[in-house]
Amino acid sequence: MYQYNEVDQITVDDRCREFRDQVERRIEGTLSEAEFKPLRLMNGLYLQLHAYMLRVAIPYGVLNSIQLNKLADISDKYDRGYGHFTTRQNIQFNWPTLEEVPDLLEELATVQMHAIQTSGNCIRNITSDPLAGVAADEEVDPRPICEWLRQWSTLHPEFRYLPRKFKFAITGSANDRAAIKVHDIGLRLRKGPNGDPLIDLWLGGGQGRTPKIAQLFKQGLTVEQLLPYLEATLRVYNLHGRRDNKYKARIKILLAETGLEALQAQVQEEYEALDKSPFVNSVAELKALYPHFAQPLVDVAQASEIANVIDEKLSGEEVARWYKQNTRDHKLAGFRSVMISLKPAGGIPGDATSAQMRALAAIAKRFSRDELRVTHRQNLILPWVAEKDLYAVWLALREIDLAESNIDLPSDIIACPGMDYCALATARSIPVAQDISKAIRKTELQHDIGKLAINISGCINACAHHHVADIGVLGLDRAGVENYQITLGGRSDENARVGERMGPGVSADELPATIERVVKFYIKERRDDETFSLTYDRIGKTEFKTAVYGVAE
Amino acid sequence: MTKQLLKNGDVIDLAGQVSADSIRVPAATPFTEIQTGLLTQELKQKTVLLEFSNFADGRGFSLAKMLKRDLPSSTTLAATGAIIPDQVALAWQCGFDSIIVSDELWHRCGPDSWMV
């Protein structure tokens, strides 16, 4: 994985000092709260319902054991022994005080981490395929481009006060696991003619109260063109994005109001006019990043030989289920990626205790080339596990209650913090997710149901991606009573689309039974291995709506 | 007294009006309008004052980049209005030649904080 160079470390250390100074100026009053707010947000510091919350960047979701150990220490020292992994492949800590945040940031800087641009109206942490560099179906490893764009976008002087936040996601696989079409800019990397990738730029996706699927904005950019083209795009957005209404300020609205062709023309004009001289070394800088992400040399013969011996151990029912559900094909023969579910029965989606984090760090160090990934479904991955080690890894994960075999199954629910923490929330998400998970588990049908995404957002801002779930749940406040709206048939993959809203919401009490009815209806109606969205398309909204409200049983 | 910050760290006290041969342009003005406006005045101004109405509105940073490639090198590009000390470094990086800070802002934020 990428290791900071001197410039990176100086940048992060400087930023720590700058933020300490900003906090001091806020406390002594020379900075007003209005002036301080965007500054603290650009450092990932939110004021939540009960206290501050700090969001720490995990660039494209990649972590090593030293970093995870530090996050464990921080969760003990500043949170209450937990870390909360998010749909942006980041981690959040609740309860730090304003005064101690500069110390917390300094601790992060010692392990090459920070909270820069994890919030605020700037370019946010860049997300990617959590299986980047290891997925069997990958065409181009997106990590070098991710790192390159991380460096370009970090503290970019021109794009720190944009009309609204700006999110990038990048994939190098035809099977999109990074949800690139619901981001402000999604990049799809393809193999180019001379070894360098070609890049398709999708623009204007987003969720929130106006969900939009991105449009193909520019096809086949070369690596030479990419940074100036992005600079031109962000410049046009910075100048023309709406600033009169924060709900209409994202680039998806600029695209809708300007029109695809007109916006493409504006960007093209600026692209042609802008000074390319700052970018003359950028491709060389990209190429210098490749060695950080080189594939390891492995003895394939040895890996597979031992794997055959271990196969027998993996035949037990519980471990076999785990192998099938929680491990994935790998680019390298003799290896698999191991997905770790942070959705155990009764747990809070995405939460890990400090003890679990320390144990995971040790497991990653011993069995996964010292590397872990965070997924946008709020789980973790050990990306480099040799097949011969799978059984040992399973035992070690079981020891810390992290061997639940439910990856991509209905109980693998995405949930935002909701009313339990978030100042924006209009309803609870976590307890509701726990109730649904309980109801689904009771049916004991999870493994028969197969892949099914249930996402629960506690407000219209859609942090839990409810618009693009098979079953999306949106918690609202109706005259002081929580009310949950159901959307069905959404997708976040390469065929991304926004789900359809069924009708009036249901109460928190009715919700688990409602979801159960929908799931049972799907199982009854589906043909063979048909996915939820395909069944939904074939049968239609009307029938599914009947299942939601349980009228014609 | 209004202060003028220069890139090299110098601070100049400006008594009364800024320069007489300067033109004041709100940072919310569309670029094409500024371009046309400046062209009709034949880019004679020695100083273009780009005025930020709100420090959270970053249009001025993009405009600076675009203006710098059109303005003759003899023209000074200055940022003014709602700028906070934390934006001084950004302003230099985006091509501003100076920043004009009101007396009120200078003292409220603390003179030290402006020295980046």
Image (spheres, coloured by chain):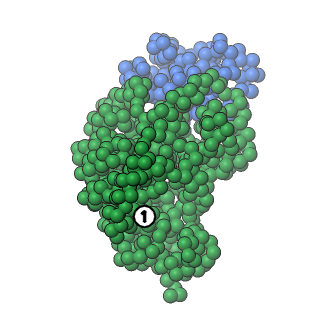
Chain colours: A green, B blue
Q: Which quadrant: the N terminus of chain A?
A: top left
Q: Chain of mark 1?
A: A
Amino acid at circle 1: Lys
Question: x, y percentage for residue A132?
Answer: 49, 46
A102 displayed left or right of A88? left
Pick out the residue farthest to the bottom: A553
Q: Residue at x 44, y 47 (%)?
A: A300
Look at the picture and state if A433 lies above or below B87.
below
| Residue toward you, B69 or B16 | B69
Q: Is residue A204 visible?
A: yes
Mark 1, residue position? A324
Q: Residue B13: image x %, image y %? A: 47, 12
Query: What is the tally of numbered marks visible in this picture?
Result: 1
Quarter-wise, where is residue A33 in the image?
A: top left
Residue A402 visible at all: no
Assess disc 1: are there few (<14), some (14-19) or many (≥20) residues with their C-alpha within 10 Å of its C-alpha.
few
The residue shown at (37%, 61%) is A311
Residue A506 spot, x, y in % from top left: 46, 74
Measuring 71% from the left and 42% from the top, which residue is drawn there? A264
Place of residue A262 in the rendered image (x, y in percent of width and height, measured from the top left): 73, 44
Q: Is residue B75 above or below residue B25?
A: above
Provide the secondary structure element on which disc 1 rests: helix
Locate residue A497 relative to residue A481 in the image: left or right: right
Q: Residue at x 34, y 58 (%)?
A: A310
Give whichever of A92, A504 is nearer the camera: A92
